[in-house]
Structure formats: C-alpha cells, structure tokens
Image (cartoon, coloured by chain):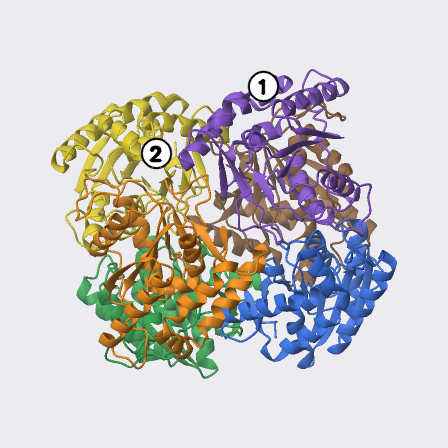
Chain colours: A blue, B green, C yellow, D brown, E orange, F purple
Amino acid sequence: MRILAIGAHPDDLEILCGGTLAKYAAKGDEVTMAIVTDGAAGSTELAVEELRKIRRQEAEKSAKLIGADFTWLGEPDELFFENKESRFKSIELIRKAKPDIIITHAPSDYHPDHQAVSQAILNSSFVATLPNIKSAHEAHELVCPIYYMDTLAGVNFQPSDYVNITEQFEMKQKMLACHASQIEWLQYHDNIDILELIETTAKFRGYQVGVKYAEAFQSAQYWLRVKPERLLP
Amino acid sequence: MRILAIGAHPDDLEILCGGTLAKYAAKGDEVTMAIVTDGAAGSTELAVEELRKIRRQEAEKSAKLIGADFTWLGEPDELFFENKESRFKSIELIRKAKPDIIITHAPSDYHPDHQAVSQAILNSSFVATLPNIKSAHEAHELVCPIYYMDTLAGVNFQPSDYVNITEQFEMKQKMLACHASQIEWLQYHDNIDILELIETTAKFRGYQVGVKYAEAFQSAQYWLRVKPERLLP
Amino acid sequence: MRILAIGAHPDDLEILCGGTLAKYAAKGDEVTMAIVTDGAAGSTELAVEELRKIRRQEAEKSAKLIGADFTWLGEPDELFFENKESRFKSIELIRKAKPDIIITHAPSDYHPDHQAVSQAILNSSFVATLPNIKSAHEAHELVCPIYYMDTLAGVNFQPSDYVNITEQFEMKQKMLACHASQIEWLQYHDNIDILELIETTAKFRGYQVGVKYAEAFQSAQYWLRVKPERLLP
Amino acid sequence: MRILAIGAHPDDLEILCGGTLAKYAAKGDEVTMAIVTDGAAGSTELAVEELRKIRRQEAEKSAKLIGADFTWLGEPDELFFENKESRFKSIELIRKAKPDIIITHAPSDYHPDHQAVSQAILNSSFVATLPNIKSAHEAHELVCPIYYMDTLAGVNFQPSDYVNITEQFEMKQKMLACHASQIEWLQYHDNIDILELIETTAKFRGYQVGVKYAEAFQSAQYWLRVKPERLLP
Amino acid sequence: MRILAIGAHPDDLEILCGGTLAKYAAKGDEVTMAIVTDGAAGSTELAVEELRKIRRQEAEKSAKLIGADFTWLGEPDELFFENKESRFKSIELIRKAKPDIIITHAPSDYHPDHQAVSQAILNSSFVATLPNIKSAHEAHELVCPIYYMDTLAGVNFQPSDYVNITEQFEMKQKMLACHASQIEWLQYHDNIDILELIETTAKFRGYQVGVKYAEAFQSAQYWLRVKPERLLP
Amino acid sequence: MRILAIGAHPDDLEILCGGTLAKYAAKGDEVTMAIVTDGAAGSTELAVEELRKIRRQEAEKSAKLIGADFTWLGEPDELFFENKESRFKSIELIRKAKPDIIITHAPSDYHPDHQAVSQAILNSSFVATLPNIKSAHEAHELVCPIYYMDTLAGVNFQPSDYVNITEQFEMKQKMLACHASQIEWLQYHDNIDILELIETTAKFRGYQVGVKYAEAFQSAQYWLRVKPERLLP
C-alpha cells in the first residue's frame, strides 16, 4: 500500500501521526512524507533563509528514520491559501505519489496553514484523478480515502479511528527529536515541552482505547472516500 | 470470535445486520442471534398466542440458515422498559453468550422497543462484568465493544462503519424471507415491501462506500468500548 | 385535519404553541388540547387539592377560546415517568383523539415532566397503532408525525419549522391570561413576567423568519414520522 | 414563483433535484437551470474543446424537456474558486434571474466545485440585493431562501425537507439521459451506473418519507433566508 | 458559596473533579461530597457487605482531606434507576444541602449509574424547589446551575469550561489515594493504573488551556440553569 | 485588559456586542473598536463616496460614547475576501492593538463579510504572533482568545457564554442610534426596526440567563485560544 502523509510544516507529521507512519513502514508499506511550507516562521532567533534550510534537513532526517520518501514543497510558511496556483501544486504532489490513502490535517485544527492544507488536499486529490486536467504527471486513478490527524492537544476533535502505536512510540519520539530547532521554539512561543505533549497525548488517546499509546484520526466523510475496510494500520 | 447480535423483535436482525452476521458466520466466527420480545404485536389477523409461536419458528429457521445459535427472551412485544428486572435478564443473556462484540439497535431508531433494548444492552453489558453482581451465570470478563445497527430507512443515522455484504446479500434475503408473517404485516402497517426496502437500503449504503451491497453501523462511543482495531467483518 | 397537542402542565401549550393551535382552529381543523399532569405543584400558597381544580378550570377556559376539545389526564405534577402504566394512559389518549399530527414538548426542554411526556408520547403513539395491543379504544391507523414545541426561552433549541402567528398573537395572549394562578407563581418561582416572555419570544422567533410574531418547532426525525408535505399551518 | 437552480456541472441538477424542478415547472412556476462550469473535465476520451460543446448541448436539451430557461456560465471545470471575479459573475446570474428561491449544492458535498459554488451563491445572493454594488443588471429585491440539494449518494447529509417526485421520476430519468457523455464517464471514473444510482437514491429518500420516489434538501439556516411557509413544491 | 458534588460511586468525584472541589474548599466555599451508591460491586475479592463498609470509610477519609461535608446515600451499586423512589431520595439530598451549584456526572459517561445519576439529579434539582412537593426538608429556593464532570478518559466529551487545578493536583492525588480498594480493582477490571490515568487526563486537559493541570466540565444547557457569570473556581 | 472588537461594517459591533464593550470600558479596560469595511453599500439613496464618509463619522461618534479607540480599515463593503493582502492588513490591525482578547463575528453569521472577517481574524491573529513574519509593527506576544458575537436574530447560534448588560443597555441603544443612516436603510432592505430588534434580542438572551438584558457569545474552540478563566466582563 502507498501512503501519502501531508503536513503543513516540518514536525506536524511527527507530532500528529508519526507512530502511525512508522507502523505502516514497519509492515512494508510505502510511506511518503510531504511538507507543504518551509517552516521559516518557526523561530525567534534564526532568520528566514537559515531556518528554511535547517527545517528541511530536520524533516529529511526524520523521514529517513522510517525509510519514508520525502517531498518538500517549500511554500512560504504562514501564507498558504487555497487558489488556482496551490491547487496545481497539490495536484502534482498527489499525481506523483499516487497514493492509496492520504493522511493530512483536520479542517478544525488551530493553525491557518493546517486548515488551508486540509482543504487544498481534499479538493486537489479529487481533481488529480481527471485526465482532462493536464499537468506534468498523469492523472491518478483513485479518489483517495483521507484520514484527518488529531488536532493539537486534541481541542475540538472527536476521533473516529485510532491506531495502537505502543510499539512505535519510541520511534515517534526519535522522529520528533530530529526537529531540534522546534523544541526550543515551541517552548518559547506556545509555552510547551513538545516531547512531553506528545507523550501525554499518546497516553490519553491510549486510555480511550485500552492500549498504552495511540494516535487518533477522523475519516473524511465524502463520497468516493469512505471504504468498508480498515485502511489504517 | 464470538458475536452476540440482539434484536428487539424477530426480523430486526435480518433487516438491519443479516448480511454482516452471515459474513461473520462464513468466516467461522460464533454468532448468537438473540431476540428480546416475542413479536406478538406484529399482526392484524393472528392473535397474540398464535403469532408468538409463529414468530419464534420463523426466527429460529432464519438463524439456522447461517448456523447461528438462537436465544429467545420472549418479553412482551411493545412493552420493553429498562428497569431492574430487564437489567438482570439482559445480564444473563450476556453472561451466557460471553461475546467479544455486541451488535444491537441504535438509540435513535424509530421503535420504542429498539430504543429501550439499545439502552438496556449498553447498560447491562457493563454490569455483567462485575463478579459482585450475582446471577445464574458467572461474570463476563469483557466490557464488550458495541456496534449499533442502521435505523429503519436510515432516518437520522450517520454511519461510522460499513460492511461489504455483496456476497452475503442473497443469504440476507433468504433469512428475511423466513419471516413470512411479517412480509404481509409490514405491507399492511407500514405500507412497505420489506424485501424491496432491504435491497434499496443495501444498495444505497453500497453506493456510499463503492460496493454493490453494504450494511451500515455506528460504533458506541463509551469508555472501554472503543478499540484500535476493526472488529466488523 | 385532527391535531392533538399534548402539554405536561396547564399553560404549557399556551406558552409554547398557543398561536399555532389558534391558527389551526381558525382554518377549521379539529384541535384537541390534552394536559398530562394536574399542575398541582405550581403554587406557593394554594394547597394541592385546591390548585388542581383551579388549574383545570383555567385550562378548560383557554381551550374554549379557540373551540378546542379538552382532555385532562390528571397525573400528579412533577412525578410523570415513562413506564407501563403511563404508556397505556398515553395510548388511550392517542387512540381516543386519533390525530393526523401530534404537537408536544421537545425532549431537550428544561422540565422533567416535559422530557418524560415527550418520550412517552413518541413511544406510545407508535404502539397505539398496533391492533394486538388491546385497550379500551381501537388502534389508531396512523403513526403520527410529531412536532416538538420550542423550549422555554429557546434554550438549546434549533428550530426546523416556524409558524407565522402574527394574526393569532392576541388570541395566544388571551389564552395564556386564562391561567391567572400561574402568572403570579412564575413571577415568584422563576422571576419572570410570563406574558412579557411570550411576547419577546414570539417577536424573536418572528425576526428569525421575517414576520412580526412566530412560534418555532422541530420535526421529530424518526421513520414513519417524516412527511414530504408541510403539516403545520 | 421564480426558481433558480444552480449546478456546478451539467448533469448535477438532473441527478440531485431534477424531479423537483420538473414538479415546479409542471405547476406553472418559472424555472431557470444555470450551469456554472463547462464540464470539460468529465471525460477520458474527448478533448476539452469538444466535450464543452457536447455538454452544453446535453444540458440545454434536458432543460428544454421541462421548459426551463437555461443559463450557461462556462467557467473552467474543476477550477471554480470564490473570489472577486466569481462573485460578480454570480451576482449577475442572480440579478438576471431575480428568483424567489435558489436551489444549489450543499457545502458538504464531495466535489470541490460543488463546495465552491455553494459558498459563492450563498454569498453573492446577498450582495446582489444591494443597489450600491453596481453591475450590468439592477439589484435584486429579495435575499433569497436557499435550499441545498442532497449530496452524491447522500454521504454526510441530513435532510430537513423532502419533495415527493413519484410523478416526476420518469421525467428525471429522461432529463439525466440527455447527458449521454456522462453515463459512460461516471461508469469509468466513479464505477457507477448513474441511472441506477438516482433510482436507488430516490427510492431510499422515498422510504424515509413514505412515498415511492423523493428528493431530499436542507434549508440554509441564515438570517433573511428562513421563511415560515413551505417553498418547495 | 455552597457546592454540592454528587458522584455515583465512591472515587468518582476524586477522579473527575477532586481538584476543583479542593479549589472551592481552599477559597472558603462550603463543599458537600455526596455518594449515591455503596460501591459494593467494585471488587473481585471482597464480598458486598465488607466492601460497602470499606468504601464508605475511604470516601469519608477523602472528604475530610478538604474539609468537605460528606453524604452517603447507600443505594445498591450498579442498580440505580430513575423512578419515583429515587426522585424523592435525590430531592432530599438537594433540599438538605441547599447548594448554589451542583456538580455531577455527564449524561454521556460510560457507566449506567453515571448516566442514571446525571438524569436523576437534573430532574430532582428542579422538583426540589417546589413547596407543594412535600418531603422531610423544606423546598430549596434555587433551580441550581449544573456542571457535568468530564467522562472517564474523556471519551465523547467536549468541554465548555475548565478549571486550573495546578495547585490542587497534589491534593487530588491524595484524595484518590484514600480509595485504596479501588486502585487494585481498577487495575484488575479495567486494566488501568487510576493514579496514572488522572495525571495523564489532568495534563491533557491542561495542555488544552495552557496550564499544567486542569479539569474539564460542561455546563448543563437548560432554562434557569445557565448564568451570565462564572461559577467554577 | 485590552479588548479588540472587530466588526465587518459600521454598526455591527453596536448591534452584536455594544453592551459588552460598554461594560468593559466602564470597568476601566481599554477597548478598541475596529471596522473592516467602509459600509458604502448600506444605502439606496446615498452614493458610495458620500455614504463612506457618513458611516465613518457615525462609527467614530459611537466609539467616543464609551471612550473606545477607533480603527477604520476602509475596505470596500461587500467584497472582503481572505487572501494574502487582507491577511497582512489584519495582522497589522492586531499587532497595533496588541489585545488580550478579540471579539468578532461568528463564522456562521448571515453576511458574507461577517464570515470572511471571522475567518481572516482567526487566521491572522495567529500569524501576528510570529516574529519572522515581518510587517510595520512588531509581533504580538499572545495568541488571543476569541469570542464570536451572536448572529443577527440569533439564527443558527448556540451561545457558550453570556454577558449581563442590564446596566449598559441604554448605552448600547445610544451607540446604535449614532448610526442614523442605517436605521432607515435596514428598515428598507431588511424590513426591520433595528432598535426594536436589539431590544428584543437582548431581552431574549436575558431570559435565557435570568437577567433583564444580555448579549450572547461563543468561545472559539482552537488550541492556544481557550483559557480556564472568564475573560468576558
């Protein structure tokens, strides 16, 4: 199976679905980790140009840990909008990866880029299947099922599906630890220890389903997206 | 795996989850079909005593088609309430069957017995696990996950899970056809051809998930009930 | 058309759907106003026995204003529960009135009797249609559509339907004014001028739909209840 | 009464509200069928230019069957966004048709163009009423009530209103049959027989309200849009 | 201010609102901790009679830690139903405590007793204010605002209000630790370390609102219950 | 405390939160009233240029009544969209005001500008806190809690919080009366007496919480926005 996970910023995938991606990878599925923006706003000390480089390196390092393919779109952080230009960029991303399933942000998450990416991917993953819409790659053949990741701190999110990541939690921590620049930044900007937050969240989601660590998802309820089998690992 | 399906009246299980039960049975799971009331109100011509016998025979015949165990509680039709007496009857039902999963009515379904059975089973399936609550059978060891069946005609029901019953649809029809007394009654009382209704519903639920025939369910969202794996077939 | 409006206490129907009943009556429909409890808790000065008589007189006087039939169940105020006994009382009420449509309390309203009446009527209006459930009157032939009235002060209520009562608002005021005992009591117990409250509510619901005065309803979403035509006046 | 039905693509209106439009037309109301995009992505064999022509002809032929006015906006298929340009195009559409009621897509439907058209029409139908917003046509005088059509296969849609189309179902089939190019395409792209899908959907919605065939709608819940009378046929 | 917290079983209040009660007490409010059932089903080794005594002692010890009044209703564990008898018991509880605010279980919590207590308290706290309903104590003068506590593991619960319990978290742990019998039982029956669970939950709720430890609540949305001031500490 | 209230048009803040702003001001908080568009579409007789001036004067006069700071963005009425340009304008607005709390439109309100402002402010108030996003003013240090104002006529709005404005209602009326141009216009376009509407609405919201006049709000449920203390006056 081919999984395309799309995060707005470097570190979003690790925080919100790192264990699930590790689990897919461990059972032999092909995972692609795609990052939409360059994350260049995530610092108070590093300038945009420098930070952009660092964040890409951090993200690539993390993807390597589970053997995932890595795609970097490099859009300007904090300024992602749904429009014709971003639709075609998203179409190319999907046509290139040709996934069986897409994992991306919930439309109700806290960050404007998360919301815009969620909407853009939902929309372009449909258009990507139409041969008459021409772009560099050939049309994808599948209108992909989409799973929305948990929101940050689970605010305003009712899960429809869970993944037991007890055996992958250590890997999830390692993946997130690659994003060294952000551990300091999130402490500064959001007043949180992000490694502590993912442990608490994974435990909380775990208590909800009777395992040590879990990640939570919502299946996107649109025609052609819903399937009568489980696609999560 | 042991599946306990609990319908308020003879024919409810066939209409709402017959294909799913057939699918469980076909892959070797142990299925119990339990009927709470005697269905004695489901006629305009047959008297209560006679109808009660007929309906039990019809239900047993249907269960036999898929090799399911059959349990008949025989409560008076249309008068099922949640109280101490019905709680202990439900506890016995569950302790005897010791299921891994329970399938029963949605609390939002149209019929008062459906609503009362839904609530009674949710409640007693918890209490059934406590050794200090004494009854004829020993406490069950598992607070069972519960899947609510679709409502009649899908009114006010948003599915969280589907089962592809394309290969079981013919069996579902045969099971329902065992309830000969009801085919006429439902035409009279509700103005419907019930065999036609289950075909349209299974097709409609099928269109929603891209298969020919499907049945729809909601997983009951309560602590100790939700699991990070798929339990439906 | 035959309309059966069922309130938990004398004055509930006037407050929550008096204008709509007046409108039905004005166009020649047969309206029955049924009161479930005796309202004997609605005073701080009058004893139970005396208040019971007064409230029945007040309610009858109000029904007479629009030429409605009047039914008094006389159950003890504040102690209405759904059980076998109350189910049969409700069945008789419905079988006697044989309505085309039922109007009653929303299940989300503030008062325990309102919630219990709402549930009891929903349930018994189904059972009332089954010939094998025997009682003094013959089975009703129709599983009635049900409209839930607005909640008090509209708390936690999203209307699905409105009735323009601009021409009936004066009559609604007169009907409520018949309940002289309650005008004082509600001032004492709930700190409100009930005549002022119904005017504000009718204006507010009116602003929502572009008329001077309106009443708001929710159609009960259950199979056999929903119709593809408007049944409200 | 003047009805403006606005579909994102040729064939959407036939699939989702064809029976209702036929019913309006049959009772003498003036119906306009407006198509926003050129539908040029709906094929795997025909090129954009050729398909655009074919689809317009198909849509016109269908509108003619019920004597509806026909409006073709010709926007590029799969690339409709809400912005200043599309707002003015929508304003002109509405100011020209001056409808009493608008029927369009639900915001929760599966297709990006459906969602964008839904939002654009909601917004521009308000702005269209303001004389100080200048365009070729004069301001419309009514902030129109809007009814959202069912979603494809009814996914994630809770109807608030239904229309009995039993007598119009045959016409609905004929209207859809005009879209010959799409019958093949939808079989290819979405793996469905669209004529079969509309029959199953109309039957399913019919079972929900006790008629043979029905179409389902949601009334848009915004101030100035909601009315205390039924506007659907 | 007088706070009446009502838990279905000994230990429920500590798990779900112990920090909040400690905070009320610390600022000088009068807190009553009332336990509805005897908790006699919460063991696999101790018999009913013995466990009942132990659990009462554990609960009293915990209440003493924050100087709360303690009320023990002693209803049979796992068999609490809403009926006339339990309504009067609840009325007495409320009339005796005469609270300004009530805290109790959410109606959506996992345990049948939690659901039944929630409904019973909502209902009887209204009836308790009516002088014509006679009982041993005088009518209460206030229809109390009600706050529902979080569900176990937060399943199916969307908070409307939070309390920062960072300074009270240690006390909450001590209070729960008084319930020594249950720490072992919950490990056995539900496979959880309850002290660990409350820490994870308090941290998770804390992350949602930017503090170290928090407890979550929902305000009950019924007329006469909602206030335009904050009543939580 | 610093409060930033952002309305789409001159008069929106007075209608929807004037009493609350007056209450903040009265207790010494610093209030800024910001108006996004020029309101130039709000007339049938005055031309755009003239109306723009008048409306600004009216809005300033109203702000002065409570000693609020006044900010005028002057965007074209009826044509506000969320895009890169409007994001930076909103960022500047927030960075300049540096509020502790933001009050703005609900995303479910009836007017396209209300919806667009709501979304734009939610998004830009996050981005405004990031030092690497450069603009004329320095980054704000707080991701502000946001309270959404009631919708017009309360359509489709479930309040989470209320403010008692009994003592401020007269001031609210005076503030709205400053918008003389609109009193006539709203009578013409929406067929309402706006002064009457705000009185009815304030009374209705008051009845819901037991005070004479109230305003209703929803707290925006996003991470970093929700606080465990009350921030409304």
Note whether residue E51 is visible. Answer: yes
Residue at 53%, 54% (x, y): give it.
D201
**Residue lying at 84% horizontally and 61% vertically, measured from the top left:** A52
- Vertical position of residue D183 compared to residue C30: above or below: below
Is disc 1 surrounded by few (<14), some (14 to 19) or many (20+) residues within 10 Å?
some
Farthest right residue in view:
A49
Chain letter of mark 2 equals C
Residue at far top of view: F45
Q: Which residue is mark 1?
A: F177
Give the percent coordinates (x, y) of residue A7.
72, 62
Q: Are marks 1 and 2 in contact (CB under 8 Å)?
A: no
Residue D95, above or below D46: above
Looking at the rendering, in which quadrant would you find the C terminus of chain C?
top left
Kind of residue indicated by mark 1: Ala
Determine which residue is flagged by label 2: C16
Choose mark 1 or mark 2, whichever is in front: 1
**Relative side of E179 to C182, left or right:** right
